[in-house]
Structures are given as structure tokens and as C-alpha cells.
Image (tube, helix red, strand yellow):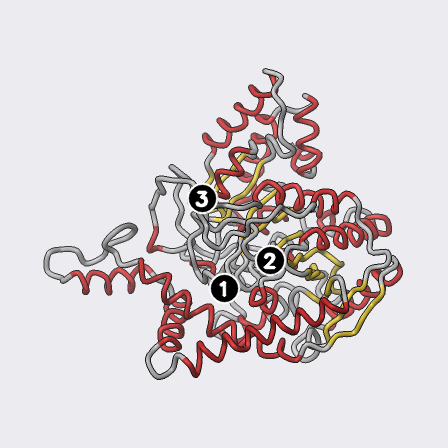
């Protein structure tokens, strides 16, 4: 079992295709791992043991018939509990959808099944993807496998923890303000936010529709690229889906190089609030890129300093609108429907019982920002700042091919440390939010351990919209350099569960 769970997704797929392993063997090994460690980690909200084994048997039968297998056939995956899955609970980490079983699959879920990826179950997350620590889940926090007393990032902490604890070789996350990249950074894994609109949002429970984006999570850059290729592509069911070819991400991951590339370093992505060890590892990564043949270009993007403020007006405003559908009348939990309350009272009681504190906070912020007399002053002004941020990126990408930065200002902080300080929590997304506001593509990959606490640090790579392949080209080159110098990066050093 230990040998199987330490394999990469690419290695698993190759060994299943050759007959060296069966998909059932691989699935059983990961289910056994979940059973052994997830009581401590709490990465999963629901494990679909029977469904996963049925999918694995179907892959083995397909191979036995001599049918061609896809590049990830039989590889297990942990799916963030924000994508609808027919016949399996989808809670979005909230009590308001406790027990809800969707009657349909999200487009992303369909594409995973069509590619013969084995879905192990649904992972824990901050309620409605609102958070940076997975502490806002209505079902309890997830632990970071490097130190179970620390957060695994958020909102997709369950997916990142499943990877870091070897419960799954692949996972899916969503990124509204950094919720794929920040968990990847603090768990020493790889997470990619594709270009906005590159991966369908149909069947993904909405938080902030102009920002939300699903994407791949893995332990290596190539594994992330293989998963990216499976889930990306135009979807007529999603009005924001881009009708354009998927960039050649797998080819880029197999041929990583930065020779001759111009790499930008933004001066706004450092300073007060950044942990010394994070800056140290980032500076070493920049030096490594230069050594590998890249030209380093200093950039000034002044509007980035306003990104956090703009985001925390735009995202709550959109969440206020999107979450209005949870009224206790059509689906999900219903409270107070005893014949003595009006429909309006039932809705109010349901929301009071079903929504957690962070969701209520953001709904109230957003409703206020959208209210008569404040719309232009708050939401309208935030959208103008968003335009300025987009223009800063456009100017930057006239000078460079990619931008690099720390993924998040600090390593994983202790569970509970920022629970009563929303502003401190929001600062975890300082480096990731500008990319969401502009719709660009971005990746986080491991770049070492912070010397003061021996915890993972993430390097963020940002590329222009629809140039996602640049992320993989640069990421693969950096990853290969780390492997050559220090062996397989990071996870071999993680504390044993």
C-alpha cells in the first residue's frame, strides 16, 4: 500500500495501462490510507467507497477488453465538496445543504468520470468557499499533515490535505481569491488557478460568479497538467466559459524551461507582514530562475495595493446575490416550518440556523455595499479598481512573460490563531487576489521550507489569460531544479501520520 500511495498520478496511470497494477488495487490502497489517517486529518466530508470501487472495476474491465485508456484512467481523486455529484452529498461545507444529494453532475464531475478518473469522495472546505483556513467549515476544521495543529489553507484545505497526507494523488479545488494556491503553498503541493472561464462553473455552487474558478491540485507539476487537460474546455452550459482551445499544458509540463524568458518581480508583493523565511525562499527562487536562464525584470504595479479592499467589496456583493437562493423553501435544510410561521419567517430561521458566522458576515457586507445610496461609493468604486488592476497586469505582460511572487505572506498558522481577527485572516490572500480580479492564470508550487518553522513555502507564478501553458513550462523547470539538487521536494520530509 505504501508504495502505491507514494506514486505520482502519471506513474499510476502508466502502471494501470501496462497491467502492472489494477485500478481496483490502486483505489483500495487509497481507501485504506483514508481509513488509517483521515480521522486525524479530516480531509474528507464523504468517502464514496462503493462508488469508487465500481469506477475502478469499470476501468479494469475496459483495459481487459483492449479499449484505449485515457491519460488518467484509474487514478483516484479527491473532489472539493462544491461540485455537484449525482447521488453523493454536496454540502459546500455548510449546514444549510446538509444531507442534500444532487440529481445531476457538474460539468467538471462529468469530465472526470468520462476520463475514467476514480472519485474517492468529497473534501472539506470553508463554508461556501469563504475562508483561508478551512476553519469555517460547519463540519469542523481540517489539519495540515505537516503539523496537525496548523491550518491546511482554505477554502480548499480538504483537497490540499488529502494530497499532502497521501490520501489521494489528485484533487480538485476552486479559487475565488486564492483558495487553490494558498492551500497548495502551506501544504507543499501544487495548485493551479486556470484562466477565468477555462474550466466550466456549471454545477459548481456559486460564491462570487465573476471570480470563482475550478482547477487542478496535485503533488507534481505534470500531474496538475494532466488533470488540467481533463477538466478544461468550452461548456455551452456555462455562459462565462471561454470558447477557445485548451493551451498545451501537458506538453509544457514535459518540456519545462525558462531559458530566454522574462520573469517579472512586483515590488508590491513584499514588505510588512511577510514572514522572513517566506521572503528568503522566494529570493532564492528568483535567483534560481536567473541561474536557469531567465531575465529578471522589476515591476511596479501600484493598484495591487488596493486589490484586497476591492476584492472584499466585490466578492461579498456577489455572494449576497448568489446566496439569496438559499431560502429554506426549495431545497436544503428548512427550519421553523411548523405551521405557526410565515414563509418569510421560515426563510429567516433557516438562514440563521444554516449559515455560519463568516457567511453571514460576507452577506451583510455585500448587501450593504449594494444598497441604495452606497452602490456607487462601494461596489462601483471597487469595480473601477478592478479595471486598474487589470491594466497594471496588461502593462506588466508587455514587459515580461510571467510574474512570480510568494504565494502567501506566511507559512501555515495555528488553528484558531486568526479565528477572531477577520482582517488578519483576509491578509493570507494578499498575493493571490489580484490574479482573480484580472482573470489571469496562476500556479503555486513548493519552493522549500521556511527555516524558522520548517513548514512549506509556495512560489506563485502568474501568466496572462489563455497562456496557462507558461505556468507549467516555468513550474516544471523550477520543480526539476529542486529535484536535481535536493531530491524529491518537501513531502518526503513531512511528519508521518
Inter-mark Cα distance, 1 to 2:
11 Å
Q: Residue furthest left?
A: 340
Residue at (70%, 79%) from the top-left corner? 271
Expressed as whole percent of the image width and height from the top left, the position of residue 348 reads: 24, 65
Expressed as whole percent of the image width and height from the top left, the position of residue 9 reads: 66, 38
Q: Which residue is mark 3?
A: 106
Secondary structure of residue under mark 2: helix
Q: Earlier in the sequence, mark 3 or mark 1?
A: 3
Q: Is residue 123 above or below residue 393?
A: above
Secondary structure of residue under mark 3: loop
Disc 2: CA contacts within 10 A as few (<14), some (14-19) or many (>=20) = many
Secondary structure of residue under mark 1: loop
Q: Which residue is mark 2?
A: 183
Expressed as whole percent of the image width and height from the top left, the position of residue 440 reads: 62, 61
Q: Earlier in the sequence, mark 3 or mark 2?
A: 3
**Which of labels 3 and 1 is toward the front?**
3
Q: Which residue is mark 1?
A: 131
Q: Earlier in the sequence, mark 1 or mark 2?
A: 1
Amino acid at each position: 500500500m505504501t508504495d502505491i500511495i507514494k506514486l505520482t498520478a502519471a506513474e499510476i496511470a502508466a502502471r494501470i495501462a501496462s497491467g502492472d497494477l489494477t485500478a481496483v488495487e490502486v483505489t483500495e490502497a487509497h481507501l485504506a490510507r483514508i481509513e488509517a489517517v483521515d480521522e486525524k486529518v479530516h480531509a474528507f466530508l464523504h468517502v464514496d467507497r462503493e462508488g469508487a470501487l465500481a469506477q475502478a472495476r469499470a476501468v479494469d474491465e475496459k483495459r481487459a477488453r483492449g479499449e484505449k485508456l485515457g491519460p488518467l484512467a484509474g487514478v483516484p481523486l479527491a473532489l472539493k465538496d462544491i461540485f455537484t455529484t449525482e447521488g453523493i452529498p454536496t454540502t459546500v461545507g455548510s449546514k444549510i445543504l446538509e444531507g442534500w444529494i444532487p440529481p445531476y453532475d457538474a460539468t467538471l464531475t462529468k469530465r472526470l468520470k468520462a476520463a475514467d478518473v476514480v472519485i474517492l469522495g468529497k473534501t472539506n472546505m470553508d463554508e461556501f468557499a469563504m475562508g483561508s483556513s478551512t476553519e469555517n467549515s460547519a463540519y469542523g476544521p481540517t489539519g495540515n499533515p505537516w503539523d496537525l495543529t496548523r491550518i491546511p489553507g482554505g477554502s480548499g484545505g480538504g483537497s490540499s490535505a488529502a494530497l499532502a497526507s497521501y490520501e489521494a494523488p489528485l484533487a480538485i479545488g476552486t479559487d475565488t481569491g486564492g483558495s487553490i494556491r494558498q492551500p497548495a503553498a502551506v501544504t507543499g503541493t501544487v495548485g493551479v488557478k486556470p484562466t477565468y472561464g477555462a474550466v466550466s462553473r456549471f454545477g459548481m455552487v456559486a460564491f462570487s460568479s465573476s471570480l470563482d474558478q475550478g482547477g487542478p491540485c496535485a503533488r507534481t507539476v505534470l500531474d496538475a497538467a494532466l488533470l488540467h487537460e481533463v477538466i478544461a474546455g468550452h461548456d455551452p452550459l456555462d455562459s462565462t466559459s471561454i470558447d477557445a482551445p485548451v493551451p498545451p499544458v501537458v506538453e509544457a509540463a514535459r518540456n519545462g524551461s525558462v531559458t530566454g524568458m522574462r520573469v517579472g518581480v512586483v515590488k508590491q508583493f513584499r514588505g510588512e507582514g511577510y514572514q522572513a523565511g517566506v521572503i528568503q525562499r522566494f529570493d532564492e527562487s528568483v535567483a534560481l530562475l536567473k541561474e536557469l536562464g531567465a531575465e529578471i525584470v522589476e515591476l511596479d504595479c501600484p493598484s495591487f495595493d488596493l486589490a484586497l479592499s476591492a476584492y472584499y467589496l466585490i466578492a461579498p456583493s456577489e455572494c449576497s446575490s448568489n446566496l439569496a437562493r438559499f431560502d429554506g423553501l426549495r431545497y436544503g435544510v428548512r427550519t421553523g416550518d411548523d405551521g405557526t410561521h410565515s414563509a418569510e419567517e421560515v426563510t429567516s430561521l433557516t438562514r440563521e440556523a444554516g449559515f455560519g458566522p463568516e457567511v453571514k458576515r460576507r452577506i451583510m457586507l455585500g448587501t450593504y455595499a449594494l444598497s441604495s445610496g452606497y452602490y456607487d461609493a462601494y461596489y462601483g468604486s471597487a469595480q473601477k479598481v478592478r479595471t486598474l488592476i487589470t491594466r497594471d497586469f496588461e502593462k506588466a505582460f508587455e514587459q515580461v512573460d510571467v510574474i512570480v511572487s510568494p504565494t502567501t505572506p506566511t507559512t501555515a498558522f495555528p488553528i484558531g490563531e486568526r479565528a477572531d481577527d477577520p482582517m488578519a485572516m483576509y491578509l493570507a490572500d494578499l498575493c493571490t487576489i489580484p490574479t482573480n480580479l484580472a482573470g489571469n492564470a496562476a500556479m503555486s508550487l513548493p519552493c522549500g521550507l521556511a527555516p524558522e518553522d520548517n513548514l512549506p513555502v509556495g512560489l506563485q507564478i502568474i501568466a496572462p489569460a489563455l497562456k496557462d501553458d507558461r505556468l507549467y513550462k516555468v513550474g516544471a523547470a523550477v520543480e526539476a531544479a529542486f529535484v536535481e539538487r535536493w531530491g524529491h521536494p518537501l513531502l518526503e520530509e513531512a511528519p508521518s501520520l
